[in-house]
Image (spheres, helix red, strand yellow):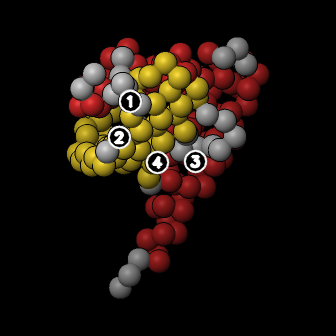
Amino acid sequence: MDLNDAVARWRAGGENRDAAQAVTALAPEVRLISPITDQFEFAGREQVRVLLEVALPAIDAIRYTDEIRQGPDVALFYEGSIDGLRLHEAQRLRLADDGLIAEITLFIRPLPALTKLMSRLGPELARRYGRPALARLLPLASGMLHGMAATGETRIMPKAAPR
């Protein structure tokens, strides 16, 4: 497979908010490393598909802006928004010998966008994985975290701006 093909399908899937299209770019044993936690990874096409089905509808107006390649490694950058908050994501993709994406590491900024994403994804992922009690608890925990991040971003950090 052409090394450009999988990356192009991955990008198109993101921009079209089409999880099924994005999954066609993935190796069967793909690993996705979350920007939220080091406690677990999403392993295999099925787990990544579930994550994409929840994440892609939550993020508006995904537009890839940059792509950098070095051998089988690709860095992608996009801009979007979540509930009106600007979001920037960097993705490190590692391609397998067959050209499919074998590993994805995600990085998201600013912090309020990440915490808002966490508050949107966590409950739905818990429901899909059969953990309804956790799905009810997660909005409380992630809501408090998002409140602190948003307050810091809008009220505290502006006071530390260079003069």
Residues tagged 1 and 4 counted as in contact (Cβ below 8 A): no
Residue 96 in picture, x, y percent from top left: 41, 31
Tag 4 secondary structure: strand
Question: Which mark identifies residue 72?
Answer: 2
Q: Which label was assigned to residue 154?
A: none
Looking at the image, the residue that sits furthest to the right is 133
Disc 2 crowd rating (10 Å Cα; few below 14, some 14-19, many 20+) is: some
The quadrant of the image that shows the C terminus is bottom left
Frontmost of labels 4 and 3 is 4
Q: Nearer the viewer, mark 3 or mark 1?
A: 1
Q: Position of residue 69 (x, y in %)?
A: 28, 46
Does the image show residue 133?
Answer: yes
* Quadrant, the N terminus: top left
Amino acid type for the residue under numbered disc 2: Pro
In the figure, residue 83 lies in which quadrant? top left
Separation of marks 2 and 1 at Cα, in angstroms: 8 Å
Task: Specify the label residue 107 is tagged with.
Answer: 4
Q: Label 1 near label 3: C-beta < 8 Å?
A: no
Looking at the rendered image, the disc whose residue lies closer to the viewer, 1 or 4, is 1
Tag 3 residue: 146
Q: Is residue 151 above or below residue 115?
A: below
Label 1 CA crowd tier, 10 Å (few <14, some 14–19, many 20+): few
